[in-house]
Amino acid sequence: MRVFASPQVYIQGFAAFQTELLCLQRLGKKALIVTDAFVMQMVGEQLVENLNRVEIESAAVLVDDSSQATFFAKTKEMIQTANYQFIIALGGGKAMDLGKMVANNNHLPVAVLPTSAATDAATSRISVIYDEAGNFVRYNFYAKNPEIVLVDTKIIFAAPQEMLVAGFADGIATYIEARSVWEDQGVNIAGAKPTLAALSLAKTCHDVLIRDIKSALRAQKDGIINAAFENVVESNILLSGLGFENGGLSLAHSFHNVIMGDCQLSVRGSHGQIVAVGLLLQLLIEKRRTEYEDYRQLFTSLKLPTTLPELNLNLSQTMIRNLAKKILLTKQAGNHLGKQVDEAKISTALTELA
Ligand SMILES: [Zn+2]
């Protein structure tokens, strides 16, 4: 079975959080904004005022270090008491994940408003679940993708460059991973065959990023937004989001999920930075040596990490073998690992990156 999923509407543009809010009215007149304290101050307070102007009443709930269950209980009560009609997930990874969870568990529509292009989480109906010890367990699937994804490039333009570069690595990995699933005739994380559309979006994501990243970064440095910047944002958020959800994930994200879940490792790096090293690991395991060298050089020129020590991972041989075992287990959660991938091959590649 081939399956393709996507949000209903994607809108991207300069100052979109000022000019495009009318589109949210169809979700309701009363919104609960899920965000964090930093984003609330930087963007959220102005957004509440702008929403008022289009007659949408809103209040914010701030994500904190409490468990998902505690956060869910708190927001459920708020929604029941104040009759919120839809959720706005505003900010980075955690706010987007929790916002989508709160919306889906309360059967409410959700608009996702990312404030950086550092990951491709905005469009999907998936979040990553860890157990209490922090071990990666599985992917959670919500019943539906967000109703609306609204991207303001004025805000993303003002975010640090390394966030755009991290999203670039995540976007390149989308294609490298989807290609692996496609070549092996594997299935995506939903257990379905990828569509032609998924592979084509992932390939476009890759090609546009390679073509436009340097021009986009120059524009950001000069303070003058250009088409290349808009293209990179669309690739990082929309093309990469649709590509990974529908094309499937493989070793690059297996590596990310495993090391993020291991409490004994004190990993340093953002999602995209870790995926960059995971991508190199995948290319080594797939024996694509030339591509590996090309990406290693490109990543170095963009100040992305290319080795394990750059992620603060200094691993003994025993730790490497352990890590390889855990990476192999992510197959059960739906990450695609080719038939030829075994513990020894993963260990060898990890050793080369150590
Ligand atoms: Zn990712």
Image (cartoon, rainbow, N blue to C red):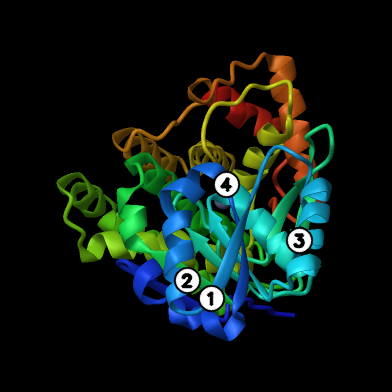
Viewer-closest of 230 and 253: 230
Which numbered tag is attached to residue 302? Answer: none
Residue 38 vs residue 118, the one in the foreground: 38
Q: Give the crowd class for mark 1: few <14, some 14-19, many >=20 residues within 10 Å.
A: some
Residue 36: give its label.
4
Q: Mark yes or no: residue 100 visible.
A: yes
Q: Residue furthest bottom?
A: 26
* Residue located at (60% from left, 26% from top): 267
Name the amino acid, label 2: Leu
Point out residue 62 in the picture as x, y percentages from the top left corner: 63, 48
Residue linked to disc 3: 78
Q: Residue at x 55, y 37 (%)?
A: 281
Which secondary structure, mark 1? loop
User: Within the image, what quadrant is residue 315 found in?
Assistant: top right
Earlier-in-chain disc, 4 versus 3 = 4
Q: CA distance from mark 2 to mark 3?
A: 19 Å
Q: Earlier in the sequence, mark 3 or mark 1?
A: 1
Label 3 – label 1 distance at C-alpha: 17 Å
What residue is shown with label 2?
51
Mark 3 lies on a secondary structure that is: helix
Q: Which residue is mark 1?
A: 56
- Circle nearer the viewer, 4 or 3: 3
Label 4 and label 1: CA atoms lie apart by 20 Å
How many residues crowd mark 2 within 10 Å: few (<14), some (14–19), many (20+)?
many
